[in-house]
């Protein structure tokens, strides 16, 4: 997971990005079911994490 912080009119925009490299089609096909399984829970965890970071940043602003 990568965090990206960019200046924004309201302060700083913090986003996350996950990149996965599948070197061939067979690997991509094996990885796809795993990704579909964890995609929603992973997104929820990210939102919770970003929300907590926001709360801490605003508390110290």
Image: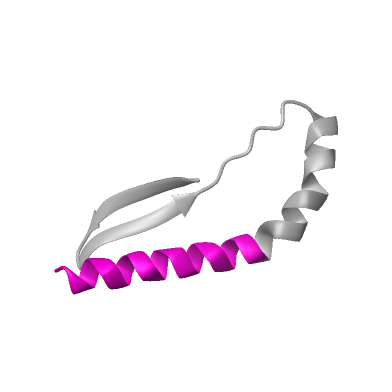
Q: Residue sitting at 63 percent across and 38 percent down?
A: 20
- Residue at 19% from the left image edge and 64% from the top image edge: 9
Colouring scheme applied when the structure was drawn: one colour
The part of the image, by quadrant, that contains residue 54 is bottom left
Magenta span includes 57:
yes
User: Relative to residue 26, is residue 59 depicted above or below?
Assistant: below
Give the image location of residue 46, x and y in percent: 51, 62
Residue 48 within the magenta-colored segment of the rendering? yes
The residue sitting at 85% across, 32% down in the picture is 26
Most extreme residue toward the left, as rendered? 61
Q: Is residue 29 left or right of residue 47?
A: right
Image point (78%, 27%), residue name = 24
- The part of the chain drawn in magenta is 41-61
- The image shows a total of numbered marks equal to 0
Residue 10 vs residue 37: left or right? Answer: left
Question: Magenta region's main secondary structure?
Answer: helix
Image coords of residue 8 (percent x, y):
23, 60
Residue 58 in the image: state x and y as whole percent.
22, 72
Q: Quadrant of the C terminus?
A: bottom left
Q: Is residue 51 above or below residue 17?
A: below
Q: Residue furthest top?
A: 23
Left or right of 11 on screen, residue 28: right
Does residue 41 lie above or below 35 as drawn?
below
Q: Is residue 19 left or right of residue 29?
A: left
């Amino acid at each position: 997971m990568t965090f990206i912080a960019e200046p924004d009119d309201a302060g700083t925009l913090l986003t996350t990005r996950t990149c996965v490299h599948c070197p061939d089609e067979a690997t991509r096909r094996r990885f796809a079911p795993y990704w579909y399984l964890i995609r929603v829970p992973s997104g929820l965890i990210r939102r919770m994490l970003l929300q907590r970071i926001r709360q801490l940043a605003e508390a110290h602003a």
